Image: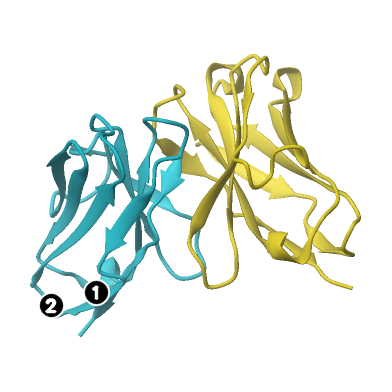
Chain colours: A cyan, B yellow
Amino acid sequence: DIQMTQSPASLSASLGETVSIECLASEGISNDLAWYQQKSGKSPQLLIYAASRLQDGVPSRFSGSGSGTRYSLKISGMQPEDEADYFCQQSYKYWTFGGGTKLELK
Amino acid sequence: EVQLVESGGGLVQPGRSLKLSCAASGFTFSNYYMAWVRQAPKKGLEWVATISTSGSRTYYPDSVKGRFTISRDNAKSSLYLQMNSLKCEVTATYYCARQRTIAAPMDAWGQGASVTVSS
């Protein structure tokens, strides 16, 4: 099974600050990597797919990058509505989620 | 508008069975792989099952294999999850989600169905 190690588990950011979240796969996943945002009490929403492609309707301050086993999500300019949990997911070999990152506004 | 609406959750005793349903609308259901993902209270997301467009292929993690069965009825645009021999550790919110292909991301999710296993 492919394991996804996500870091950090939590972080706090100021308004306008740039934030990065990372995911490390236990083996290469060929960019079959998605990022989801889950706001409190809501279902997850797709932000990024294929490692770097922005889902329709997602603000351009969100971006994804990476290759091989290392991937990251960047939020360029933290906004109040970005306070949420974030999860990475690989779909290269079945489906595995990272443990999640709780992002709070400082 | 794409909609996925889960139903069938509730409180169930250990060892019993429960069947969740997911009603889909706003898209051509038969063109999509479908999946179930669960989230235990205050925990992360865990993939539970996936089914191909025709229903001929199903996929499960070892944690539920043999106890959970995913199925679909394309004529009714509905997805199901039969859960047997329930244990307390399966207490979670269960989401249905759609995928355009087997390797595609889950681009639409339902609101979730809460399942509590307790005596």
**Badge 1 element:** helix
Mark 2 or mark 1: whose residue is earlier in sequence: 2
Q: What residue is shown at x 63% (from left), y 34% (from top)?
A: B24
Name the one closer to the observer, A69 or B7.
A69
Pointers 2 and 1 in contact (CB under 8 A)?
yes
Mark 2 belongs to chain: A
Q: Horizontal and vertical percent for residue B51?
A: 62, 26
Q: Horizontal and vertical percent for residue B22?
A: 69, 40
In the rendered structure, the answer to whether residue B107 lies left or right of residue B24 reads: left
Q: Does A14 appear above or below A48? A: below
What is the three-letter code of the residue carrying label 2? Leu
Question: How many numbered tags mark residues here?
Answer: 2
Q: What residue is shown at x 44% (from left), y 21% (from top)?
A: B101
**Badge 2 element:** loop
In the rendered structure, the answer to whether residue A38 lies left or right of residue B92 reads: left
Q: Horizontal and vertical percent for residue B41?
A: 59, 71
Name the one closer to the observer, A54 or B116.
B116
Q: Measure how far apart labels 2 and 1 are at the Cα level.
A: 7 Å
Name the one closer to the observer, B115 or B87.
B87
Q: What residue is shown at x 50% (from left), y 56% (from top)?
A: B45
In the rendered structure, the answer to whether residue B49 lies left or right of residue B42 reads: right
Q: What residue is shown at x 64% (from left), y 14% (from top)?
A: B54
Which residue does the numbered mark 1 point to in the structure image? A80
Q: Residues within 10 Å of mark 1 (few under 14, many from 20)?
A: few
Q: Does B71 appear above or below A7? A: above
Q: Residues within 10 Å of mark 2 (few under 14, many from 20)?
A: few
Which residue does the numbered mark 2 point to in the structure image? A15
Q: Horizontal and vertical percent for residue A25?
A: 29, 45
Mark 1 belongs to chain: A
What is the three-letter code of the residue carrying label 1? Pro
